[in-house]
Image (cartoon, rainbow, N blue to C red):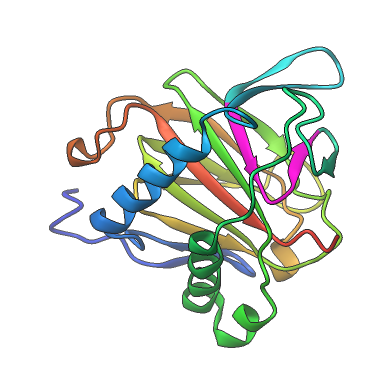
Amino acid sequence: MDAELFPRARAEIAPGAVHVPGWLDLAGQRELLAACREWARPPAGLRTVRTPGGGTMSARQVCLGWHWYPYGYARTVVDGDGAPVKPFPDLLGRLGRRAVADALGADAARAAAYDIALVNFYAADARMGMHRDSDERADAPVVSLSLGDTCVFRFGNPETRTHPYTDVDLRSGDLFVFGGPSRLAYHGVPRVHGGTAPPELGLEGRLNITLRVSGL
């Protein structure tokens, strides 16, 4: 069906997990993309993440506020150039609070003092295996913003990496928030649809900006 003729509707994918299509307009996407390009510059810039088993993640990453590495947080890029992590920007704090308010309500937003951003860049062949965001010491909702190419976002359950799960197409400008009973649900990206980014954005590939509260 034509997405413009039949607009995509907001949907609760699981208890506490909400997809809001087209949440960020094109001007907001451009502003966020320009900021991501600055954050990706060294020092403490975009890096390849190595797993404890010796492998590498196909999505590249830059961290803000706190530096994430498997499986913990630090104030420096301990698995990269060793530079101090870039500060968490006010822009993302404002977006995070507004996102939670729009998805889960004002009460949930009041407790969401975001201080971590993970910015992941996916080329067309990049993937992300099923995992949980469980290295934080806080249970505030996770906020996920998408820019660029559409991806298949697989959202599962807190108990297992396998079924049941739901596949959701996340397009540029989409918002996904998960908290409450879904805060520790497994999720991943099994596919990126290359060449689907809005041409006005000027981005090849997909950027995902994930906001978390560290509790640290």
- 50 or 103, nearer to the observer: 50
Q: Is residue 201 magenta?
A: no
Q: Is residue 66 magenta?
A: yes
The rendered magenta stretch, by its main secondary structure, is classed as strand
Q: Vertically, is 209 above or below 212?
A: above
Q: Vertically, is 38 above or below 178?
A: above
Q: Residue at x 32, y 26 (%)?
A: 204
Q: Quadrant of the C terminus?
A: bottom right
Q: Position of residue 17 (x, y in %)?
A: 59, 64
Q: Residue at x 85, y 37 (%)?
A: 71
Q: Which residues are magenta?
A: 60-69
Give the left or right position of residue 96, taking residue 83 as reference.
Answer: left
Q: Position of residue 54 (x, y in %)?
A: 82, 12
Q: Residue at x 83, y 64 (%)?
A: 215
Q: Vertically, is 198 above or below 57?
A: below
* Residue 143, quarter of the rendered image: bottom right
Q: Residue at x 56, y 57 (%)?
A: 89
Using the rendered image of the protein, determine whether residue 24 is visible from the camera's viewpoint.
yes
Give the left or right position of residue 66, taking residue 11 as reference.
Answer: right
Q: Position of residue 66 (x, y in %)?
A: 74, 48
Q: Position of residue 108 (x, y in %)?
A: 64, 80
- Most extreme residue toward the left, as rendered? 5
* Residue 57, quarter of the rendered image: top right
